[in-house]
Amino acid sequence: MAQKLIRMGIIGLSPGNGHPYSWSAICNGYNPERMEHCPFPVIPAYLRKQAWPDSQLSGVSVTHVWTQERKVSEDVAAAANIEFIVDDFTDMLGQVDALLLARDDSANHKEFAAPFLRAGVPIFIDKPLSNSVAGAKELLGLQRYSHQLFSCSALRFADTLRPRELRTESITEIRAVTPKYWSTYSVHIIEPIVAWFPDRGPIVSIEKMDSKELGGATTVLVSWARLRASFTATNQAEGLISMEYRSENSIEYRNEIDSFFSFKSAIQTFVMGIERREVCIPRQDTLEIIRIIEHGS
């Protein structure tokens, strides 16, 4: 029996976030000429490196798009082969099997997600799910079933950021840095550590450093029972996401990211959760990540 095609809707666009272009292209393929006009040049750059149509995610199609501006919706649709543009995001209800909420302005997540959660539609909410534990629990409380809501940073799948030379169990300290703002980007450096170090133990302490002493950057120090980490968002527009791993005798530095692979893996995991009817990322991990984010906010 042929696999049923999962029809997805996508909601965008928040400032500085090009995920409606990239996520839709991963599912649909893309129009190279139209994608060149995407306002995020990094997206057509990494899409050009893939082998199409082989790189396209199978079994899914983004069929509907909504953004707050019709012209933006038209641009996304043309670039990423999306058939339908809706004038109200709730018009997708009854038309799609799942939803990609591709906005990282978490203060607006409930407004967009609630109608779909109440209707039982599975939904991938862009990172961070919320900037507060209470907000995350409120969204999770709207689920009709346990695996309906999926949310993560795609960098939990960025294997190129993982330590290669040092054994995970030998690492005692991590220094992680991301450009841009704590509220939207800290999740990119916190989530991989929570995902990759399952034996870290419970949190012992969380401390936010004085940003004035850090040149405007936001740094949060976290001590687990068996691991320490400093997470820094530079509040600068440019820069690399990097991980520095420290053991008793060695240091390893990683900053390579395959964005396409990471995004594709995240969407693939969301789809797997739909098909298997299971929670793919432990809820306690998601809430722990948000607890750390909240301390830095």
Image (cartoon, rainbow, N blue to C red):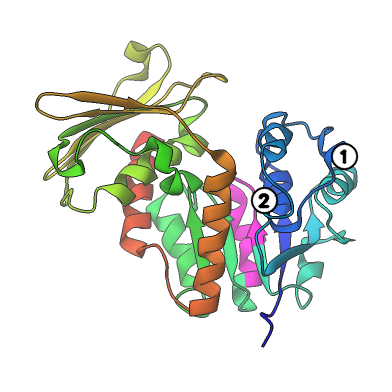
Amino acid tagged 1: Arg
Q: Which residues are magenta?
A: 100-116
Q: Dots 1 and 2: beta carbons under 8 Å?
A: no
| Image quadrant occupied by the C terminus | top left
Residue 71 location (% of width, % of height): 90, 43
- Whether the magenta-drawn stretch holds residue 123 is answered as no
State which quadrant residue 99 falls in: bottom right
- Inspect this view and state whether residue 294 appears: no
Where residue 278 is drawn, which disc sits there? none
Instruction: Determine which residue is flagged by label 1.
Output: 34
- Inspect this view and state whether residue 103 appears: yes
- Dot 1 falls on a residue whose secondary structure is helix
Instruction: Determine which residue is flagged by label 2.
Output: 23
Residue found at x 36% / y 19%: 211
Residue 156 location (% of width, % of height): 42, 48
Q: Is residue 224 above or below residue 229?
A: below
User: Please, what is the dominant secondary structure of the magenta stretch?
Assistant: helix
Q: Nearer the viewer, residue 116 or 265?
A: 265
Residue 79 location (% of width, % of height): 83, 45
Within 10 Å of the Cα at label 2, are there few (<14), some (14-19), or many (20+) other Cα atoms?
Answer: many
State which quadrant residue 5 falls in: bottom right
Q: Nearer the viewer, residue 197 or 91?
A: 197
| Image quadrant occupied by the N terminus | bottom right
- Whether the magenta-drawn stretch holds residue 104 is answered as yes
Residue found at x 38% / y 49%: 290
Residue 131 location (% of width, % of height): 45, 46
Q: Earlier in the sequence, mark 1 or mark 2?
A: 2
Amino acid tagged 2: Trp
Residue found at x 51% / y 20%: 239
Within 10 Å of the Cα at label 1, are there few (<14), some (14-19), or many (20+) other Cα atoms?
Answer: some
- Dot 2 falls on a residue whose secondary structure is helix
Q: Nearer the viewer, residue 1 or 122?
A: 1
